[in-house]
Every structure is written in structure tokens, then in C-alpha cells.
């Protein structure tokens, strides 16, 4: 699967042409699908004059999101979790660096020679 480029005429699932900003997934699945009829019942053609068919499977972003919701895929949640993981990984690196510097400080500490006291 890949993002469709160029943009297809219709979504294979919902049949909507969507807005210009609608993104489509090209399922890279070719079938011998039916032709699409326009509002007058004639076989629809795209702006380039090609027959509009459902031979290639393209899904609009709305249909993909609806399918993802059915599968309990939550892209916003996953994005938030990924950002939190990256933030925590950065924190871990900062604390590791801090710990290394503390160990270096302790390793370079001079020995203090304190004479033992004798009992009086
Ligand atoms: Zn759709």
C-alpha cells in the first residue's frame, strides 16, 4: 500500500470523490470492478476522459480512519504515546549523562590521609 499519486477520482469503499485535500491509499490491488455511473446514469469519466471504474482499490482517508477505529487503532493516542516515549528516552539520556559525570567526580576525588587518633 502507498499514498495514491495521482489522486483517484473516487474512493472505492464510499464512492465519494472527497475534497482536493482528501488523501487516498492505493491498496495496490487491481480487480475487475464495475464502472461507475454518474448522476444521469451514464458511465462516468474522469477529468482526463478515462472511464471511472473500481478496478483499482483506493480508500479515502475517511474510510481508512473509520476502518482503523473499528480495529481500535487510535492514531492520536499512538502519536501521543510515541511523543511521551521519546520525551522519556531523552530524560533517561540526561540522567545517564548526569550519573556518568557523578561517577567521574567520585573517581577523581583525592584521597584524604587522616591520621588515626590514639586513645588518650
Ligand atoms: Zn471513502
Image: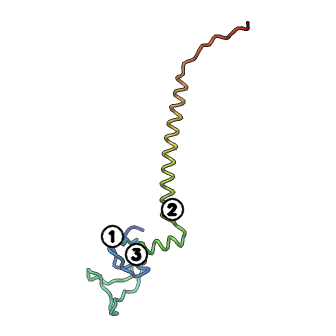
Instruction: Indicate left or right for 30 with 97 as reference.
Output: left
- Are there few (<14), some (14-19), or many (20+) residues within 10 Å of tag 1? few
- Are there few (<14), some (14-19), or many (20+) residues within 10 Å of tag 2? few
- Residue 26 x/y as whole percent: 39, 72
Q: CA distance from mark 1 to mark 3?
A: 11 Å
User: Viewer-nearest of labels 2 and 1?
Assistant: 2
Could you say which disc has been placed on residue 5 in the image?
A: 1
Q: Is mark 2 within 8 Å of ligand 1?
A: no
Q: Residue furthest bottom?
A: 41
Kind of element beneath mark 1:
loop
Residue 79's place in the image compared with 98, above or below, is below
Residue 77's place in the image compared with 11, above or below, is above
Q: Residue furthest left?
A: 48
Q: CA distance from mark 2 to mark 1?
A: 28 Å
Q: Residue furthest front?
A: 120
In which quadrant of the rendered image does the C terminus lie?
Answer: top right
- Residue 25 x/y as whole percent: 40, 71
The earlier-in-sequence mark between 3 and 2 is 3
User: Viewer-nearest of labels 3 and 2?
Assistant: 2
Q: CA distance from mark 3 to mark 2?
A: 26 Å
Q: Image point 53% across, 73% down: which residue?
A: 70
Kind of element beneath mark 2:
helix
The residue indicated by pointer 3 is 58
The earlier-in-sequence mark between 2 and 1 is 1
Q: Image point 33% across, 79% down: which residue?
A: 9
Q: Quadrant of residue 107?
A: top right
Front residue of 63/43: it is 63
- Residue 1 x/y as whole percent: 42, 68
* Cβ–Cβ under 8 Å for marks 2 and 1: no
The residue indicated by pointer 2 is 77
Instruction: Indicate left or right for 6 with 108 as reference.
Output: left
Amino acid at each position: 500500500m502507498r499514498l495514491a499519486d495521482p489522486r483517484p477520482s473516487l474512493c472505492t469503499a464510499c464512492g465519494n470523490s472527497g475534497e482536493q485535500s482528501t488523501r487516498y491509499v492505493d491498496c495496490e490491488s487491481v480487480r475487475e470492478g464495475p464502472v461507475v455511473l454518474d448522476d444521469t446514469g451514464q458511465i462516468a469519466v474522469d477529468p482526463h476522459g478515462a472511464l471511472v471504474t473500481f478496478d483499482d482499490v483506493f480508500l479515502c482517508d475517511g474510510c481508512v480512519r473509520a476502518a482503523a477505529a473499528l480495529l481500535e487503532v487510535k492514531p492520536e493516542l499512538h502519536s501521543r504515546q510515541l511523543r511521551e516515549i521519546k520525551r522519556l528516552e531523552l530524560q533517561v539520556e540526561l540522567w545517564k549523562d548526569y550519573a556518568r559525570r557523578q561517577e567521574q567526580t567520585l573517581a577523581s576525588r583525592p584521597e584524604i590521609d587522616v591520621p588515626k587518633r590514639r586513645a588518650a
